[in-house]
Structures are given as structure tokens and as C-alpha cells.
Image (spheres, helix red, strand yellow):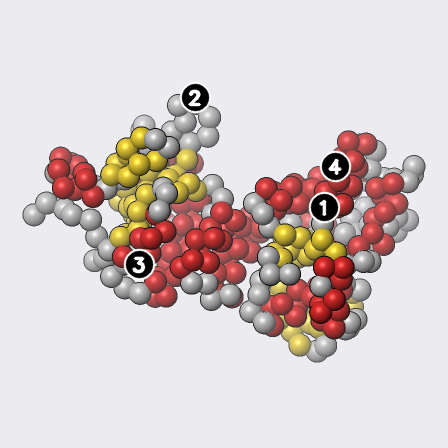
Amino acid sequence: MKNLRHIVDESGLQVGSRSPEKITECFEELLARLERARERGEAIATSSEFYDAPVTAEHVLHEVLYTGDSPIEDRDLKQRLSAAFDKLLSFWDEDEALLPLVEALDVFIGSERVFAPSLALAHAFRASARALGCLNLRSSGRKGQVPVSVGGRVQPLHFVVDEASQRALFREAIEIEDMDEGRFAENAASAFPDLSWVEGVWDGLKKFRRPYGEHRRGLTRHLAALDDHGAALFDTLMSTHPEEIGARLGALGVTASDENGRTKQDKQARKERTRRYEGEDHLFWWHTKLRPETDRIHFLWRPSPDGGASEIVIGLFTDHCHTPD
């Protein structure tokens, strides 16, 4: 299952509450993760025990979805959950070679022993430098990196409960899987989903003065800051206090600036920073600095023409663009 990116944690579907509202809220968030993963092409697999996973003291998952006394009263939600679950892969059906990886039943989270074949699989993948997200409910108390023991060996697994932890999985995977330039580019849609990209931008990773491997962590940090905060910072400050944007990004560990007026008037400088995006030429003046003296990420804040969400567009990776003497 080369493209597998998530499993559903059978032991993490317990709500711990009899409140229909609480149960509904938890499963709405899980559905949002499933739908977002599908939109981004992130394959999800489950074990054959998935539908027998406990949800409340009185109900297992298939009873929540299909019986008359389900604690979820919203019929539309149950139908959407059922449709989403039906599209999941069964890792035992897909690849029998995975069976030996999940035979161990001594799965521990802290001192708690859980029945979770899917966590055993994620644990085996992590041991071979593959990062899988463990989808579960927020009520499980598991989010982000959590130590899990299988067969006496402890490894951190990444639990996904919301958008932030879903993005974080793919950012962590860059280092866990030792991604080269090509895989970094393929991973970007999930790691930095709110950024947009000029066609051919990834070729620029080879134009840095320092090797890509030296910059990989910095690239992840810079792109993550722009993805998480860039558009909102520009939306808030560009029309009133644009001089504060660089400092705000600096507080996130990213050195960034606009070009000065002299550079913006220079013909060669304009040419080197111009890129075509969605049928129009744009100037990418703003840039982050991977090193003080070299290697830049040039980007553009692009307000929506119809008042919708703005976007940050990554235009070029380069060692250094021309500046006038």
C-alpha cells in the first residue's frame, strides 16, 4: 500500500459521553478529516475489526451507524459517515503481506493496553521510516505525537483529530521519510494546503546556493508559517501597517521582507521576479530568507477580486535575485 497515509484507530472512537450532541460533534470532526483526506488524495485504511470498535458503553460503530437506537440522531450525518467509511481501504484485503505486521495484540498507549490492529500497522510503518496518521476522535485525548508501544518497542505515532494535526503529519513526514526534492513537492498539497504554486516553481529547489538537504527543515518551517499565517497577516496589516508584516513573520521564526523602492524600479530586478500565474504576469517582491546572505523563497499575497479568501502564491525558489548596486 505505497500511497497509504492514514489508518483509523479502532481504540480511539470512544466518545466517553452519552450526550448525543457530544457524540455528533466528535463524529462531525472525524468526517471532516475523512473528507479532507479524500480531497487531497490521502489514502486511508482500516482493519476488519473497524465496525466493531466501541463508541459508547452501549454501542459499537456499526450500531451507531445502522441501528434505530443510535446516539446520533442526525440521519444525514450517519449517511455521510457510512458513505465515507465505505470508501476506505481494508488493509487486510488490499495486501496480505501486512498481516504479520498487525498480529501483535500487546499495543499500549501509556499504561493502557488497547486492541488496535491499525496502530500496530502504523507502528510497523514508523519503524521502516513511513509516517501514517492515526485518525481518531478528539475525545480520545490523543493528538499529534504520542508514544505507542507494540511488542515492547516504543515509537511516536501521529494522531490526527483536526486540520492542524492533519497538516502537521505531512510536515513531520518530510524528515521521517527523508524526502528528496521530488517527494517534497508531491507532499506539499497536504503539508501546505492553503498555499498556491506557480507552475514549475519546484525546479528552483535546485537553484539554491546551499544543498537542498541543508535547507529542508528551513523550507518546511518557512512554508508552514506562510501556509498557517501568511494570508491572514497580509489581510489584516497590508492596508494599514504593512511595515509590521516582516516582524510578525519574524516572531514565527521566518525572516521576510518586501523589496525597497529602488529595486522595484530596476528593470532587471523586475524581470527576475516576474512569474506567470493563472494567465497573468505577477511580481513576487516579498521573500523569506533561508540564510541571511542567500537562498530565497519569493511569494505573492493575492487578494481575492470578489472579496473571498486571499491566497499566498509561491513564485520562485532561488539563490538571490538581482538588486541594483
| Residue type at the position of mark 2 | Asp
Q: Position of residue 97 (x, y in %)?
A: 71, 69
Q: CA distance from mark 1 to mark 3?
A: 39 Å
Mark 4 or mark 1, earlier in chain: 4
Q: Is residue 262 above or below residue 221?
A: above
Callout 1 amino acid: Lys
| Marked residue nearer the N-terminal end (2 or 1) | 1
Seen at 55% across and 56% down, the residue is 169
Which mark is first along the chain, 2 or 3?
3
Distance Cα–Cα, label 4 vs label 1: 11 Å
- Nearer to us of marks 3 and 2 is 3
Sequence-wise, which precedes: disc 4 or disc 2? 4
**Horizontal placement of 231 versus 48: left or right?**
left
Q: Answer yes or no: do the residues labelled 1 and 3 have beta carbons within 8 Å? A: no
Residue, disc 1:
87
Residue holding disc 2 = 306
SS label for mark 3? helix
Badge 4 amino acid: Arg
- Considering the numbered disc 4 on the image, is that residue within a helix, a strand or a loop? helix
**x and y percent of residue 152 in the render?**
70, 78
Given the current orientation, which residue lies at the most extreme left position? 325
Apparent side of residue 96 relative to residue 246 in the rendered image (left or right): right
Distance in Å between CA atoms under marks 3 and 4: 44 Å
Do tag 4 and tag 1 residues touch (Cβ < 8 Å)? no
Q: Which residue is mark 4?
A: 80
Is 20 on the left or on the right of 134, as rendered?
A: right
The secondary element bearing badge 2 is classed as loop
Question: Mark 3 belongs to which amino acid?
Answer: Lys
Alpha carbon of mark 4 to alpha carbon of mark 2: how far?
Answer: 31 Å
Which residue is painted at 43% across and 21% down in the image? 306
